[in-house]
Amino acid sequence: MGAYHRPRDLSAALTVLAAGPVTLAAGCTDLFPATGNRALPGDVLDLTAIRELRGITRTDQGWRIGATTTWSDILRAELPPAFDGLKLAAREVGSVQIQNAGTLAGNLCNASPAADGVPCLLTLDAEVELAHANGRRHLALGDFLTGPRQTALRVGEVMTAVHIPARAGSGVSGFVKLGARRHLVISIAMAAVRLEVEAGRISRAYVAVGACSAVAQRLTALEQALAGAPLTADIGALATPALVGDALSPIDDIRADAPYRRGAATTLVARLLERMAAP
Amino acid sequence: MNRPFPTLALTVNGTPHPVEAAPGRRLSEVLREGLGLRGTKVGCDAGDCGACTVLIDGAPVCACLMPAIQAEGRNIETVEALAEAPETAALQRAFLRHGAAQCGICTPGMLMSAVALLRSGAALDRDTVENSLGGVLCRCTGYAKIIDAVLDAGGTARAPDPAAGAAVGAPVERLDGVPKVNGTERFGADEVPPGCLLVRAVRSPHAAARFSLGDTAGWASARNVQVFTAADIAGRNIHGVIPQFVDQPSLAVDHVRQPAEPVAIVVGPEAAVADLDLTDFPVTWRPEVPTLDMDSARSAALLHETREANTLITGRVVTGDAEAALAASAVSAEVEVQTSYVEHAYVEPEAGVAWLDGDTLVIRACTQAPAMDRDDTAAALGLPVERVRIIPAAAGGGFGSKLDLSLQPLIGLATLKTGKPCRMTYTRAESMASTTKRHPARMRARIGADAQGKVTGMIFDGDFNTGAYASWGPTVAVRVPVHASGPYRTPNYRAEARAIHTNGPTSGAFRGFGVPQAAVVQEVLYDDLALALGQDRLAFRLHNALRDGEASVCGQVLQGVGIADCLEALAPEWRARLTACGAFNAAEAGPLRRGIGVASCWYGCGNTGLPNPSTIRIGITPEGRLRLHQGATDIGQGANTVIAQIAADALGVPLSTLELVGPDTALTPDCGKTSASRQTYVTGSAALRAGQSLRARLLQMTNQGPDAPIALPGGGAVIVGTGPTAATIPLGELGTDANGYALSVEESYDPPTRALDQDGQGIPYAVYGYGAQLAEVSVDMELGTVKVLDIVAAHDLGRVINPLLAEGQVEGGIAQGLGMALMEEYIPGRTDNLHDYLIPTTGDMPRIRSIFIEKSDPEGPMGAKGLGEHVLIPTAPAILNAIRHASGARITRLPALPHRVLAAIRAAKGRP
């Protein structure tokens, strides 16, 4: 049995981190499935007793979502419509049981290409806050996620929060997930959209697709095509295969083949846009 | 590093429970092993099944995913406390009243999830309940009764308590239900005698390999454990379910033929064994190129030297001249269908415990076949049969796979070698990787019809990937040709099915023994023919449905044939929904299209042309207690209740008078295996005879007339008759028999069948059940996703013994059929968990309406027929035919995952 650290404040956690490699643990909804053991193996740093890491606060700069904030916390939080998509995604994470334990930072640090939280956070221009005994740094979420199960987290670092800039808190948002069953399912594809709308026209669009590339990605060419377009029932037509499916790099796996994913992503984005145009 | 465990201050159900445990230990383990609160079940250790759901400060979480220290100082609630509070006790009663617990393994997780919902104050509707229970998997019920129970949590209806002679037909609650809802049921992993050792298996990482063991003794002593291998086994060290085909090593000697085959066991105290790293076990593997597909198997190296072309067996049924009939047919249709490995995915992984009682090896483990387990374990380990006793643990689902031995020889060996109680619980991955599957099939068939729509002939040819060992492959190969015609008049017929060995997982028994695969082929072709003829698809089937007095493809003249009744029962719904689907599609501007499909089933109950008797004993103790020795294992399907209902009515006493004994090979006569939909029919027939026999004896002893009532008031007396002519039997004066009874009877029943000849002609089964299902689906034409909206299921049960349990069977079978149709595809080495291998959740199930037909069978007990497997067979083809009706997509590769459906939609559109 390794050492099990469960400090109550971040500085103590950073001291443990500085002393050597440990497994960072919070909701454990990815850690436990990865081991057949009855206890978490190796040296563990459990972050769940650190109060400052959990919860959502409004700051001058925007919103700070603590690293160990659970999906259920997000569902219960009072947030503007720009976060509606994130709340929809929270509802799709595993099951109620998983949403009650699983954390935002865990979802990001696990870095699954099918992580449910990532597409919405990309459309919210999320930044992650990483702490180290020697200081803190911020990274755009897109820069933090470097590949399947790969992140820019350095040795000795821990994710402490996700920041949503104030400017991203405007507009309306949505999220849709496609899987082969209703609950407890890993996505075949998913899409997130946030739209800033002025006088019936999209002033800026933020669109991201997950599970169709090594890392969920923003569709910048589509976003440009949407900017300035009237938000009407035919808005989905702008989500063309060239701007959605062809912009992605899906793989064949047990859930679907790559051509299907390209088409499905195009359809999901188009439908999500249409749904958001509906009165 | 050896650290002392800290004491965690847990509060469970309001009571402080200090417990020494590693802080990072799963809460589920601490509750079960540390505190002995085994009501919380473990199904996957990955958050995929929700069986371990507990409430932490009121919120449901998976206890398997929570480090115990995170629960410190918080309010932990488990199933054990539910009976104490009125609201939660009412929920438990609602579960019993609605038949929401079948095997019961998911029940604690369902209950805890439901408690959280009920306390939330949310308005209860079906959607809310579905979403709240979406994190708990159930493999038995199809969720309908669970959802009904939660919606009726405040209900006060009382369970029927039928009078003497009125039990059969009454929707009585399961007699074994209470322990399932209060957390006291003892499944395979729940019995832990003091001083019990833990067993783990060392398994092959290769599908095919030679191997040699290194210094296992040195490895073991360095770890304070013991290692046992094939060399330690005194018996034949092979097991198998069919005597002529016994071929599976209990522990491989020097050669493994399938993934996860065990080569050694590691035994020791839990602390030494539980988390021991087995990757450095001293074994040298010499991998061979595995034969993984049936095409290459024909010419590949033989897996078993006597089985040429790696063909285990070929089953065949021939009547008339099918080629000539097809050539002369006005229309014919042809298809090739491919199906996948399907995993049973019961929520309880294999588990059990063994100990020595004197020189008898006692094994208490999950099983569907205690007497077979006893005989086969004894042979494998080299013990006389009378030195092995099997006590079936409550089985957390079986569906066919728990007919085969799994851990019995392993824990038996460990106990024989150590002299101590030894237990073993498979991990989810181990359960999925090492136990049997539904056979993947590749089937081709042609069916012809005349211009009026009368089927003229059928040719069926199927290859079934039976994997490395025989298991129930022979049964599948024999059953499929007998059933592939469907319950339809097919005068000219040639069907052949082969079980082909590969180095894949062993395929065995799974609800329907290959018939569900074959039904897909036949029912898809029936739609082809109806469409080609321009006939209504239901009318076409009805036109060809077998009738009383007609011969099956085996030449058996059938009686009590209810298929036409089933199809006719669907007809009003069929017509209404045809119209409704047309209207919906005409109005729908979006991507959804609705369609309906229909398919039938028939299924012979019991072994195919082979003996399979059951024996029931009923005894009255000198004190006047009435005991039913019921040896049919109840794996959730309800045998404990149904057999008792039949026995009670046959004897003429209230059901509540009976005490159940067993199953237990030391206490109950052999009732055979729980498979082939045989228990209600075969064991029910034995129970009927035993009840009648005891009744006749009591009447004769008292010289009473045939209608005299029988009462067991206690006090050592049986009273027969009423009023002044009533007679009392003083039990104490009768002495006792070898089983301690003042009076007892034992009766057997064996179905009257006749072995099949080389053309498959004979009487394979004495009783068949029939059914037909109508499915309505919505297909997303752009995404290829399918939502099954409704299923109407009409089944002919001959006589409905218990309508509540029968509905539960129908709904559960439909869930498995839906999974097979739409999502279930086991890929060896890739889907050994319940998040990559998908089974339906609460949100995937349609509304289901059951219609029961009672076309009495002349041979069945009180006219009854089997049901358990029948219910799954029509579901997949009905759904596939509905998809085609909605979208044009003719699916020939299962499961119909969205990308396959979309490809088929496009292919259909590309056709002229």
Image (cartoon, coloured by chain):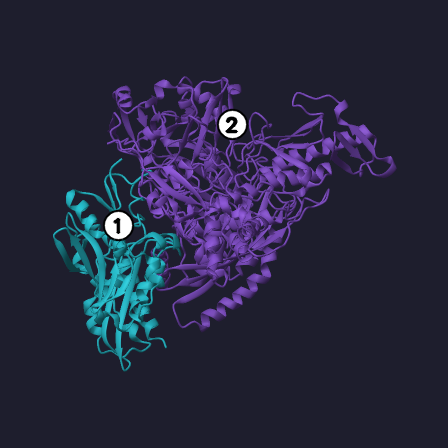
User: In which quadrant of the rendered image does the N terminus of chain B lie?
Assistant: top left
Instruction: Label 2, secondary structure: give it.
Output: strand
Q: Is residue B520 above or below residue A2?
A: below
Nearer to us of marks 2 and 1 is 1
Residue B889 drawn at (x, y percent):
40, 59
Instruction: Label 1, secondary structure: give it.
Output: loop
Mark 2: amino acid: Ile
Q: Is residue B18 left or right of residue A34?
A: right
Residue A25 drawn at (x, y percent):
26, 47
Q: Which chain is cyan?
A: A
Q: Which chain is purple?
A: B
At 73% from the left edge and 38% from the top edge, which residue is drawn? B652
Q: Is residue A111 above or below residue B665?
A: below
Residue B764 drawn at (x, y percent):
57, 36
Residue under pointer 2: B390
Tell which of B47 and B214 is nearer to you: B47
